[in-house]
Image (cartoon, rainbow, N blue to C red):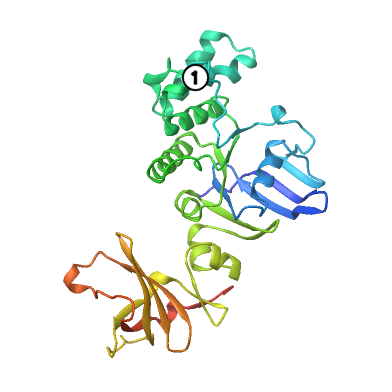
Amino acid sequence: MQTAKQPIVQLEAVAKSYGAAVALAQLDLTVYAGEFFTLLGPSGSGKTTTLRLIAGFERPDKGRIMLDGQDVAALPPFARAVNTVFQDYALFPHLTLVENVAYGLRAKNMPKAEAHAEAEKALAAVQLADFAGRKPAQLSGGQRQRVALARAMVNKPRVLLLDEPLGALDLKLRHQMQTELKRLQHETGITFIYVTHDQDEALSMSDRIAVFSQGRIEQIGTAFDLYERPASVFVADFVGSSNLLGGSTLLRPEKVRLLAAGAEAPENHAAQPGVVREATYLGAVTRYQVALADGTSLNVMESNALPVGERLRLAAGDAVLAVWPRDAARKIGN
């Protein structure tokens, strides 16, 4: 029997302004216990303000911030069962890793031996047990981020807040840490609330995602919901690459195939002739920009998984027939 989801963080009609600038306007949001929940949006959309309000670094102008059913809007950060991981790690350079991780426990008057034992367990959880005696300067960026995670998790918070923690890492390391974060969240069961502007990061890691724009939430849903059934043009355009046909019909680039000019379209497919304006080889895929006969500019993403002999080798100037399943083009909001 499936158990009911238990709300752990709830924002009710929360508003926040800085002078004349409205950061959040009447925000309502519910995060459930054990979720990996992501706040996604461009810079200035309100996602980081939301995280800071939950953490207690900011106070709302109005509205309630509930944690486990208690209104904590007036409580300082240290009085909330949450911890925050920042992009810059904020480690103490003069302390060893075990001392860094144990710092919060020692601040709560836990005996040194017990605090260090807990810190060593936390370091083992992030696969740094053998580095306990090192100092932050002796680590890579990814290792320092793991230490910051261990330090946040050792206090066993009900909610872990992560403010673009992977933004300073290179692409390969960022992908590795995404996998690591999802593993840790699954193993510990701690509720993660994660802020990012990176759509791929959000789609790959999250149980649910809230898409922010101009201080409001445009849509909340799973990665599938947001990508396949966007509720607005903003979500369709921001989450993944898109083609907007007629201004309100979404066609994702990977749903389109390019055939040689004069070819016959498969059954139940829409088809339009066009000319390749740009072809960019990206390894796993090739990205094309195609000018259709009706004047539409169409983005196409074709997999390079087929053997070379079975793929068209298209270049700028080639005439093509763009085809896609009729049901692949969806009215936004339906």
- Circle 1 SS class: helix
In the drawing, does residue 263 fall left or right of residue 327?
left
Q: Quadrant of the C terminus?
A: bottom right
* Amino acid type indicated by mark 1: Ala
Percent coordinates x, y for residue 216 in the rendering: 69, 58
Residue 309 versus residue 155 in the image, above or below: below
Q: How would you rate the neighbour count of disc 1 (Cα within 10 Å): few for under 14, some for 14-19, many for 20 or more?
A: many
In the drawing, does residue 267 fall left or right of residue 165?
left
Quarter of the image for residue 57 reads top right
Task: Spot the residue most to the left.
Answer: 309
Residue 272 versus residue 285 in the image, above or below: below
Percent coordinates x, y for residue 299 in the rendering: 43, 73
Percent coordinates x, y for residue 333 in the rendering: 59, 73
Quarter of the image for residue 190 reads top right
Q: What residue lies at 32% left-to-right and 83% top-to-bottom?
A: 320
Q: What residue lies at 46% left-to-right and 31% top-to-bottom?
A: 146
Viewer-nearest residue: 17 or 276: 276
Residue 175 versus residue 116 in the image, above or below: below
Q: Which residue is mark 1?
A: 119
